[in-house]
Amino acid sequence: MQDNEKIYRIELSNEEYAYVENLKQEYYKKLENMTEDERLQYFRDNIAIENKLNFEKEINGTVYKVNTYFDENAEESILAKIFRLTKKS
């Protein structure tokens, strides 16, 4: 995180924290029981959302194809960019 970025803090009650911690442990157990290939496929299907950002849409008989690319060397994360852009509006 860069020095000029804000840090957002979410405070949870003990009950909420226990719930989130339980979800995390269940997730770890699920991943532990998978083979390496199953884990890779799971991440491709559920975590790598950039693949889901590519789509086609037809408007007035013209098909538009949208492909999304991410710069691995970018200095700003997508979340930081969204915060910055929404802050300006």
Image: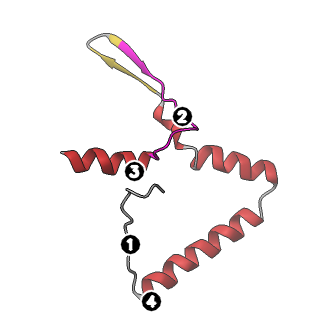
Inter-mark Cα distance, 2 to 4: 39 Å
**Residue 20 counted in the magenta span:** no
**Residue 75 counted in the magenta span:** yes
User: Which residue lies under the disc numbered 2?
Assistant: 71
User: Which residue lies under the disc numbered 3?
Assistant: 80
Q: Residues within 10 Å of mark 3 (few under 14, many from 20)?
A: some
Evaluate if marks 3 and 4 touch, with contact meaning CB atoms under 8 Å apart: no
Disc 1 marks a residue whose amino acid type is Arg
Mark 1 or mark 3: whose residue is earlier in sequence:
1
Q: Which residues are magenta?
A: 63-77
Inter-mark Cα distance, 4 to 1: 16 Å
SS at circle 4: helix
Q: Residues within 10 Å of mark 4 (few under 14, many from 20)?
A: few
Quadrant where the C terminus sits is top left
User: Which residue lies under the disc numbered 1?
Assistant: 9
Residue 74 location, x and y as percent?
51, 39
Residue 7 location, x and y as percent?
39, 65
Inter-mark Cα distance, 1 to 2: 27 Å
Evaluate if marks 2 and 4 touch, with contact meaning CB atoms under 8 Å apart: no
Inter-mark Cα distance, 2 to 3: 14 Å
Instruction: Tally the marks.
Output: 4
Mark 2 or mark 3: whose residue is earlier in sequence:
2
Residue 55 position (above or below residue 50): above
State the predominant SS element of the stretch in magenta: loop
Residue 34 position (above or below residue 41): below
Residue 35 location, x and y as percent?
81, 55
Disc 4 marks a residue whose amino acid type is Asn
SS at circle 1: loop
Compared across the picture, whether 32 is left or right of 86 comes to right
